[in-house]
Amino acid sequence: MQAILRKYIRFIDFIQKINGYILAAIVGLMTVLIFWQVFARFVVGTPLTFSEEVSRFVMIWMTLLGSAYAMREGALIAIDILPDLAKGKARIILKVTIYLLCSILFYFLIMNGYEMAQAISRQKAPSTGLSMFWPMLALPAGGLLMLLNTVALIIEEFIGKEE
């Protein structure tokens, strides 16, 4: 059983690495788009019509994927006083309870985010003509990654982290 759980954790770590590369690419894309927008507006004199919109959509994805990345790394903002004060089994129970409560939030983010994306899928973005489904798909995608990362964190609480 422990071998299966460790394989799950390794799989999630692999997904986490891919997510990190995607986040780096998103930051690079946003940098190029915003630089291009500023250059086109102030040097060429003709602002681009699509770069702000695409940057906004990419930022939505970056926020949700980045939150999932931070969840796995333990880098999300949190109040650490109770887990730091608790020792032994009380600490594990407290952390697992927190992770389970977070999982409920992520479940609702997945379900309601997908419903919202479906509901507005017929709307088109003004500059790009892109369906609003794609930027809104970041909600369930980020929620799913956060949920998978939370399950990995719960497993690690019980079987320990692998070196």
Image (spheres, helix red, strand yellow):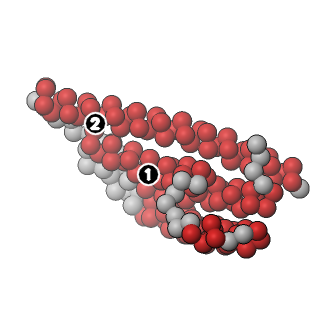
Residue at the spot 54% in from the left edge and 53% down from the top edge: 75
For disc 2, the marked residue is 34
Residue 114 seen in render: no
Q: Nearer the viewer, residue 131 or 159?
A: 159
Q: Residue 63 carries which label?
A: 1
Residue lying at the far top in this picture: please name it: 44
On-image quarter of the C terminus: top right
Residue at the spot 32% in from the left edge and 52% down from the top edge: 124
Residue lying at the far right in this picture: please name it: 1
Residue lying at the far left in this picture: please name it: 45
Horizontal side of 18 relative to 137 (left or right) equals right
Residue 90, relative to residue 113: is it above or below?
Answer: below
Q: Nearer the viewer, residue 118 or 65?
A: 65
Residue 12 seen in render: yes
Residue 26, relative to residue 78: is it above or below?
Answer: above
Residue 122, relative to residue 45: is it above or below?
Answer: below
Horizontal side of 130 relative to 88 (left or right) equals left
Q: What residue type is labelled 1?
A: Thr
On-image quarter of the N terminus: bottom right
Q: Which of 10 and 74 is in front in this view?
A: 74
Of the numbered discs 1 and 2, the one sitting upstream in the chain is 2
Q: Which amino acid does label 2 sit on?
A: Ile
User: Where is residue 95, by image quadrant?
Assistant: bottom right
Residue at the spot 49% in from the left edge and 60% down from the top edge: 77
Query: Callout 2: 10 Å neighbours few (<14), some, many (20+)?
Result: some
Residue at the spot 13% in from the left edge and 31% down from the top edge: 42
User: Where is residue 40, by image quadrant?
Assistant: top left
Check disc 2 and report its element: helix, strand or loop. Answer: helix
Horizontal side of 33 relative to 101 (left or right) equals left
Check disc 1 and report its element: helix, strand or loop. Answer: helix
